[in-house]
Image (spheres, grey):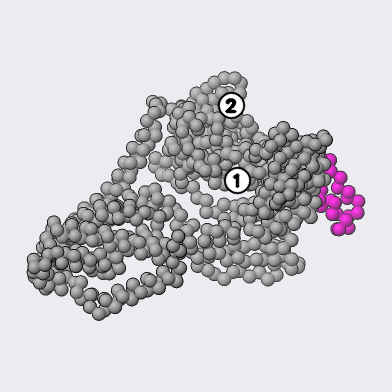
Amino acid sequence: MKPAPSRTGRWIAVLLVAGIAAWAWSRYDLGALLTLDNLRSSRDALVGAYETRPAATLATFFAAYVAATALSIPGALVLTLAAGAIFGLGVGLLVVSFASSLGALLAFLVARYLLRDAIQARFGKALAPINDGVRKDGTFYLLTLRLVPVFPFWLINLLMGLTPMGAGRFYLVSQIGMLAGTAVYVNAGTQLAAIRSPGDILSPGLLGSFVLLGLFPLLAKAGVGWLERRKVYAKWTRPRSFDRNLVVVGAGAGGLVSAYIAAAVKAKVTLIEGHKMGGDCLNFGCVPSKALIRSAKMARQLKKAHELGVVDAAGRVDFAAVMQRVHRVIRDIEPHDSVERYTGLGVEVLQGHARITSPWTVEVALADGGQQTLTTKAIVIAAGASPFVPTIPGLKEVGFLTSDTVWGLTELPKRLVVLGGGPIGSELAQSFARLGSAVTQVEMAPRIMVREDPEVSELVAASLRADGVNVLTGHQAVRVEVVDGEKRLVARHGNAEVVIPFDELLCAVGRSARVTGYGLEELGIPLTPRKTIETNAYLQTLYPNIYAVGDVAGPFQFTHTAAHQAWYAAVNALFGRFRKFKADYRVIPWATFTDPEVARVGLSETEAKEQGVACEVTRYGIDGAGHHVRGHPVRHRRPRPRDSRRHRPRLRQDSHRAWQGPTAGRDHRR
């Protein structure tokens, strides 16, 4: 394969071409030639040349027009008028139409060859919405720009070369889109004597006509969208009337907020939950994990109390009492997410299994054995996620815990294997180690917490090891077995097998969106490669009146993100005919409640570099804070002001604690 030219080679090429163009412009005084006065004075000579040597004149004119367009040289207007003056309307239109499109394509390719890679690498994140829009609707946008001649065509050529639009599509759309404007200018050239300035060509009325013509592609796009929606709904019978404005499937964070918003605006809303109100956060995630982490932290502090002069604090752990407290904390918060509270807010709450049978109907198998069919204008799916269990031989036969079932333990495991080095696995591994378990954490990747920067991962790993966790990275689980009555995990590390005995195994390798069992397959709603429900920027699925939020939709499995999405879904579902809002993920907080806690907002340094986003890293150490309030170092310096379009400052406190995040609360994963 021929190697790609270097960036230096590309810029040498562009400078060479620019130098030749500048020399030609100066040497032959092209600025004076490409004027209306010069065209008017030389018209007879040009017409005579065409009559004497038609083929040569046509070829020369064609080449000159292509070159002028490709090099974005001012004067395309005069050349277009010249085509009408020399060749007449028919031939002139034919020549200019193809010459302008070919020249535009060459300018497009030059911009792509010289600039696109560098610009996309530097500004790829910011340009992502534009790239997506061009991939999806670029034909309509380009056609609109081409039909309105007030937009500089040379600028359109260069800018489109920086996008993902294919060269063939660009040429075809340009050929069609520029035809109307070209015809006007070529026809004006046939009346050259009457033209004193460009204003004589484009009257306000004609400009208005072009603007209306430019609206045609957008109207066509709207029409295509309407036809696509009709096609999507074609096989379904729309009810003549609806019982409800909104039905919400799932009463986790996303579902509760969606129902709350609908009730707040007096919409008729039904919330359906087949398991526990409050979803994963209340029952299996944020709340119980924070309660366990609090007890584990206290146990560690008591064991280290002698360092502070407290000599009689043994810190003996009653694990059964710890788990009783965990469930007591859940019960204390349950009323906030209860059926009674939401009923009081005006939400109809049904406990049972929901199945979406059409874009407007939901069947509910009620917990009391009854059946109910609901008709609704819109549906929000907030079905959440469940722990992912890998297909490891022997795992199901030997038995395992997940982040959902671990809360049923009443005895502390003497030997605990935690499979997974993500946030959930790291939090629980550290907590159980502090409570007295011999914990081994097994992670297939080279480091734990792989979505954080390497030094942050190492800081957390060092802290886990200090608490007694045997952190094994680069170990792939191969099988689970029982030998002589002892449970064992066999992992591969390089070419060797490592045997890890255990009493309990906690599987914490991630969570999978719940996308089966409630009608998605029958409706044909597509999934993403990550097996979440595919939605657009407005959180709409294949059916515009069906929305998805939270873990089932992604892209983040955070409770606060689910609630954030719920606002967009509920508002769009209820008021989308008047105004729709795109979900905004620019500022998403992350928090992992290990000790030290790790938190960030937006991109990490590693992610910024991977996406080509220029960033500036500033570190504030707190070891030397002295008598100042913790977290406010003596030398507190702000980073130099930077152009926000080029730099994204990232602030981190590097010392014995990572970023000082919150110590409790429900704003967490799941």
Task: Report which residue position mark 1 lands on.
Answer: 558
- Give percent across and percent down for residue 49: 11, 69
**Mark on residue 659?**
none
* Residue type at the position of mark 2: Gly
Which residue sits furthest right? 312
Q: Is residue 521 left or right of residue 337?
A: left
Say which quadrant the N terminus sits in: bottom left
Q: Earlier in the sequence, mark 1 or mark 2?
A: 2
- Can residue 416 be spotted in the picture? yes
Residue at figure coordinates x 57%, y 19% from the top left: 370
Distance from disc 1 to disc 2, alpha carbons, whole Å, reads 25 Å
Q: Is residue 75 left or right of residue 158?
A: left
* Residue type at the position of mark 1: Phe
Label 2 element class: strand
Q: Which of the two residues, 316 or 229, is positioned nearer the viewer here?
A: 229
Range of the magenta residues?
A: 299-323
Label 1 element class: loop
Task: Report which residue position mark 2 lands on.
Answer: 352
In the image, residue 494 lies in the stretch drawn in magenta: no
In the image, residue 305 lies in the stretch drawn in magenta: yes
Residue at figure coordinates x 45%, y 28% from the top left: 358
Q: Residues within 10 Å of mark 2 (few under 14, many from 20)?
A: many
Q: Which of the two residues, 183 or 623, is positioned nearer the viewer here?
A: 183
Residue 292 sits in quarter? top right
- Give percent across and percent down for residue 19: 33, 76
- Can residue 287 be spotted in the picture? no
- Give percent across and percent down for residue 488: 77, 40
Q: Residues within 10 Å of mark 1 (few under 14, many from 20)?
A: many
Residue 284 sits in quarter? top right
